[in-house]
Amino acid sequence: MNMDNLNTQLINEYVQALGQDVFIQTVELYEQQAQAYLHQLGEVAKIADHVQWQLQCHAMKSAAGNMGLQQLHAMLSSLEHSQETALQLTQRVEQLTQLNQQSLQQLKQWLAQG
């Protein structure tokens, strides 16, 4: 199974330290918070508010990194200081949303195997 979006070593360390059940609860909390981040990114993208874009990207980047979602973390890192137009930022939110969904799907599959 392709797990390229994940830092499985970090995730494994969390599962060993916290236990599978607690980590799954953490994943569920992240999933809820990610929706809020993506919503906020969508709102600030519409008006190309680059200051708020940077703040929201930074917050989501930290959360994604803490969950072991390495590809999402990398994408957010590369976009954090973007000065793109509203249209371009809106397209980025769509890309982030897709990558977040793919990453969470991989994470859940990885946890189901464990």
Image: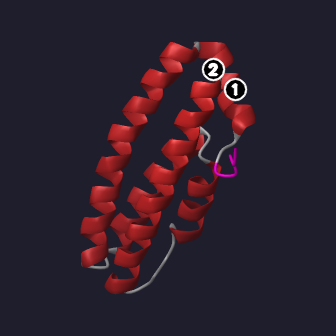
Give how far across and how far down residue 62 sits, in percent: 53, 46
Task: Identify residue for label 1.
Answer: 12
Q: Is residue 2 magenta?
A: yes
Crowding near the residue tagged with mark 2, few <14, some 14–19, many ≥20 C-alpha atoms within 10 Å: some
Name the image quarter holding the N terminus. Answer: top right
Residue 58 or 86: which is nearer the viewer? 86
**Amino acid type of disc 2?**
Val
**Amino acid type of disc 1?**
Asn
Q: Residue at x 65, y 22 (%)?
A: 114
Marks counted in the figure total 2
Q: Residue at x 29, y 66 (%)?
A: 42
Name the element at disc 2: helix
Residue 15: which disc? 2
Residue 36 or 80: which is nearer the viewer? 36
Q: CA distance from mark 2 to mark 1?
A: 5 Å
Give how far across and how far down residue 4 sits, in percent: 70, 51
Give how far across and how far down residue 70 sits, in percent: 64, 50
Q: In screen coordinates, is 30 left or right of 18? A: left
- Vertical position of residue 48 compared to residue 26: above or below: below
Check if mark 2's residue and mark 1's residue have beta carbons within 8 Å.
yes
Q: Is residue 9 magenta?
A: no
Direction front: furthest residue: 1
- Identify the main secondary structure in magenta: loop
The residue range painted magenta reads 1-5
- Vertical position of residue 6 compared to residue 112: above or below: below
